[in-house]
Image (cartoon, rainbow, N blue to C red):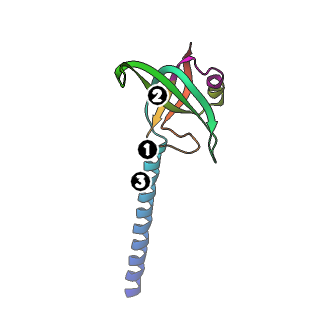
């Protein structure tokens, strides 16, 4: 009889550990998804393309910078410029941007909570070109 109750205690403990491990895996997976794959926001930014480059030590990623002009509290008074640094995921989008530096673009982007090294150096990822002038 005593041996049977010890068996039940062991199997109950194993079941508890299994459930605990599964809960921790679910929480960890959810956190990783939310931090790195959940699209926090998306929109369109417009401005003059400053540069588009391919760079990286291990993961070669496409990066770019858009200069947005606007009226604000600049150092010299009225006109201020804002920089929008972004990563590019699509080769074809990068090719168009690379060949048209200095032109005015409307770029669609997605914003994430975290940066993945193979996706780029910023939380802003441009996925398509809306307009080019």
Residue at 56 percent across and 39 percent down: it is 120
Mark 1 and mark 3: Cα distance apart in space? 11 Å
Which residue is farthest bottom?
Answer: 2
Task: Give neighbour class at mark 2: few <14, some 14-19, many 20+ (Cα, 10 Å).
Answer: some
Instruction: Report the magenta residues as a range.
Output: 96-107
Residue on which disc 3 sits: 27
In magenta segment, residue 49: no
Task: Give neighbour class at mark 3: few <14, some 14-19, many 20+ (Cα, 10 Å).
Answer: few
Q: Nearer the viewer, residue 126 or 35?
A: 126
The total of numbered circles placed on residues is: 3
Q: In screen coordinates, is 14 left or right of 56? A: left
Q: Position of residue 59 (x, y in %)?
A: 63, 45
Mark closer to the observer (1, 3): 1
Q: Secondary structure at mark 1?
A: helix
In magenta segment, residue 105: yes
Which residue is farthest front?
Answer: 76
Residue on which disc 1 sits: 34
| Picture quadrant where residue 133 is located | top right
Q: Is residue 55 visible?
A: yes
Q: Position of residue 57 (x, y in %)?
A: 63, 47
| Picture quadrant where residue 51 is located | top right
| Picture quadrant where residue 13 is located | bottom left
Residue on which disc 2 sits: 83
Q: Earlier in the sequence, mark 2 or mark 1?
A: 1
- Give the vertical position of 13 relative to 88 (above or below): below
Residue at 63 percent across and 28 percent down: it is 94
Q: Secondary structure at mark 2?
A: strand
Q: Nearer the viewer, residue 2 or 91?
A: 91
Mark 2 and mark 1: Cα distance apart in space? 27 Å
């Amino acid at each position: 009889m005593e041996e049977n109750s010890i068996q039940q205690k062991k199997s109950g403990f194993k079941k508890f550990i299994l459930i605990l491990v599964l809960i921790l895996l679910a929480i960890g997976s959810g956190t990783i998804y939310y931090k790195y794959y959940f699209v926090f926001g998306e929109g369109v930014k417009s401005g003059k393309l400053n540069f588009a480059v391919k760079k990286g030590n291990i993961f070669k990623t496409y990066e770019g910078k858009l200069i947005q002009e606007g009226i604000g509290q600049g150092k010299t008074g009225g006109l201020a410029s804002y920089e929008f640094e972004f990563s590019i995921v699509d080769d074809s989008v990068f090719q168009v941007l690379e060949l048209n530096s200095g032109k005015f673009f409307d770029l669609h982007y997605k914003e994430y909570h975290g940066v993945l090294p193979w996706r780029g150096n910023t939380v802003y990822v441009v996925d398509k070109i809306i307009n080019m002038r």
